[in-house]
Amino acid sequence: MEALHWIKNKPDELLSNHADFSKCFLMGTSAGGNVVYHVGLCAAESWDNLNPLEIKGLILNQPFFGGNERTQSEVRLSNDKVLPPIISDIMWDLGLPKGADRDHEYSNPMVGIESNPNLLDQVKLLGWKMLVTGCDGDPLIDRQVDLVMVLKELGVQVEGSFTQGFYHGLEIIDPLKAKEFSLLVKELIRHF
């Protein structure tokens, strides 16, 4: 939220001259996708305090979500060379508040949704669009797909884009995949 307030209060000259503050999307990859989800929820609650920024949506690229119970994809990809679940567990142990487990709302968005069914009401009221991406070679894919399904059930405007044959973070090192992802984001923004 501090970054949004910084942009609002002290926009960089480059942003002031070239950015359209009336059409903002928050985007993050992996752990950044998780951060964007939570910042987005906070921003939706204080949207009227962010002028001139007008957020139109959230883009969660392969968001890094977790949970105590292993999903089928985590079991299937337990020996994944990029992001094995055991490494995800260690990251959550290091990153979550002391005493919290992977079913904390910061790790597992389903916990927040189940404990507060109205959590996304403001996102819906504002008409925000969400894009969640993932791939079947990522141990986190089941959590990403589940989030899209639950968001749809709650009436959130959400689109899931899930590919086959790739792994977590591929677009960071593969220019072709980076271009494909950029085109997907461009298409989402253009339709808003």
Image (cartoon, rainbow, N blue to C red):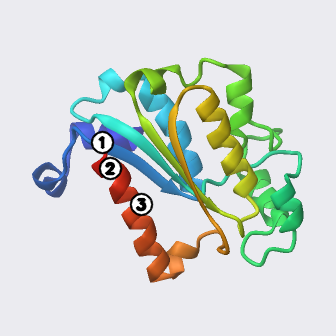
- Quarter of the image with the C terminus is top left
- Left or right of 50? Residue 171 is right
Instruction: Look at mark 2 in the image and give the residue it sits on.
Output: 189
Q: Residues within 10 Å of mark 2 (few under 14, many from 20)?
A: some
Q: Nearer the viewer, residue 106 or 126?
A: 126
Q: Position of residue 39 (x, y in %)?
A: 49, 38
Labelled pair 2, 1 in contact (Cβ < 8 Å): yes
Amino acid type for the residue under numbered disc 2: Ile
Instruction: Look at mark 3 in the image and give the residue it sits on.
Output: 184
Residue at 47% x, 25% y is: 124
Residue 105 visible, this angle: no
Amino acid type for the residue under numbered disc 1: Phe
Residue at 52% x, 30% y is: 156
Q: Position of residue 81 (x, y in %)?
A: 77, 78
Instruction: Look at mark 1 in the image and give the residue it sits on.
Output: 192
Label 3: element kind: helix
Q: Residues within 10 Å of mark 3 (few under 14, many from 20)?
A: some
Labelled pair 3, 1 in contact (Cβ < 8 Å): no
The vertical placement of 131 against 78, above or below, is above
The vertical placement of 25 against 174, above or below, is above
Residue at 44% x, 81% y is: 175
Amino acid type for the residue under numbered disc 3: Leu
Total numbered labels: 3
The vertical placement of 54 against 163, above or below, is above
Task: State how far apart marks 2 and 1 are (Cα).
Answer: 5 Å
